[in-house]
Image (tube, rainbow, N blue to C red):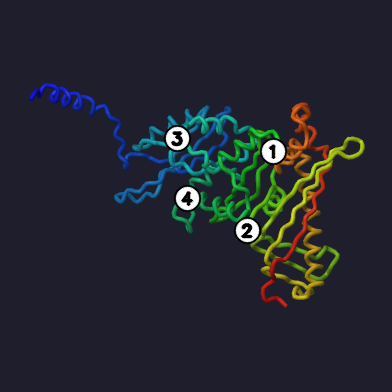
Amino acid sequence: MNRLPICLLAILILAVLPGCDYRILERIGFTYAASYDTAPENQVEITVSIPRAEPTIKVKREIHSAIGKSSKDARVKFANETDLLLVNGQIRVLLYSEALARKDLSNEINSVLRDTSVSPLVKIALVNGNAKELLSKNYKQHLSTDKYINRLLEKSSSNNRIPKTTLYEFERDYYDDGIDPIAPILKETGEDITVDGIALFQDYKYIAKIPNRDALLFSILRGKFKKGDMSLELSSGEDSSSEYIMFTSVLSDRKVHVERRAGGTMHVTISANFKGSVHEYIGNKKLSVDAQRHEVESKVSEIMTESANRLVKQLQLHKVDSLGIGIHVRNYMSYEAWKKLDWREEFPKVEIECKLRFKAKDYGKIR
């Protein structure tokens, strides 16, 4: 048997093996969350949170921060501060300060998009305050801040307190000329982090904010959804009696109708039917009596309709179509007519009317 080919193959394998890229798990730093803040001279400060699972050390995670002219520049700097090989394949959350978002997030988001190791499902959120401080702080009731933030965003979007916003959804809305992107806002409240509202964008620039109290209303106007809960004060300022209702398990269905009226004015009607289980009611009505329950439903519908019209006016004032009304207008018009239309300038001029109707699915044992 000719052993020469076998010997040559063995020598070739021995020569190639030292050049193989061995990545030992314990030596890899999987970035779980990153934050971005403004820095002097138009630079950006980037902070990363890296979980440590080694039993020999007490540290649960590493925090590294650096200032650079770009994301890559900053990452090169703090990569020298750790013994781990930093990778982005497991990143879950990207946090941007409101101050940075008011300038422009195009450089930061495009840098992430160019990194093929980052999943398009990574969550995006703004921070009311300093994003580095929020990510770096350890909260007593939570073992890991980065995982706490990730789960908070997951829970809030699943309950429709905020619309789901990932890198994919943000970029999809950015490139769609009939809707503007949005993102949730977080803030620190003592020893906890809470959702502070919804950020409205023009392209990559943060323009305005929907307060947290209107978050569910915004979701109702934006589209169909399940789950969610809301509380509402039904008594007016002139009424001395207190009337309050809280409903849960909200189901919503939205329809948008577009038409041209006399004189060429464009009119849009947003009709939304939503129903929920009455969890609590304080007032002088008996929900078990059909007529009185319908009175409460009508009052809820009236208050919600007024709030919806006010919210839409706010969007028009800031020229941000975060509800996607432009998508329905685009479908109503011909392609040529839509392309000639400057929707950013036309949107504030459109007559938009909201009609919301509430129905109580059940009211438990309330009498």
Task: From the image, tell me which residue sits under label 4.
Answer: 147
Question: Is 241 located above or below residue 145 in the figure?
Answer: below
Question: In the structure shown, which secondary structural element does the residue marked by tag 4 occupy?
Answer: helix
Question: Is 183 located above or below residue 77 in the figure?
Answer: below
Type of the residue with mark 3? Ser
Where residue 223 appears, as percent x and y from the top left, is 68, 49
Q: Nearer the viewer, mark 4 or mark 2?
A: 2
CA gap, disc 3 and disc 2: 33 Å
Residue at the outermost left position: 1
Type of the residue with mark 2? Lys
Question: Is 13 located above or below residue 290 in the figure?
Answer: above
Answer yes or no: do the residues labelled 3 and 2 have beta carbons within 8 Å? no
Q: Nearer the viewer, mark 4 or mark 3?
A: 3
CA gap, disc 2 and disc 1: 24 Å
Question: In the structure shown, which secondary structural element does the residue marked by tag 2 occupy?
Answer: loop
Question: In the structure shown, which secondary structural element does the residue marked by tag 3 occupy?
Answer: loop
Type of the residue with mark 4? Lys
Q: Earlier in the sequence, mark 4 or mark 3?
A: 3
Can you tell which mark lies on residue 179? 1
Which residue is found at the position 34% from the left and 37% from the top?
83
CA gap, disc 1 and disc 4: 31 Å
Can you tell which mark lies on residue 117? 3
Q: Earlier in the sequence, mark 2 or mark 1?
A: 1
Quarter of the image for the C terminus: give it.
bottom right
Q: Earlier in the sequence, mark 1 or mark 4?
A: 4
Task: From the image, tell me which residue sits under label 2.
Answer: 227
Answer yes or no: do the residues labelled 2 and 1 have beta carbons within 8 Å? no
Residue at the outermost bottom position: 367
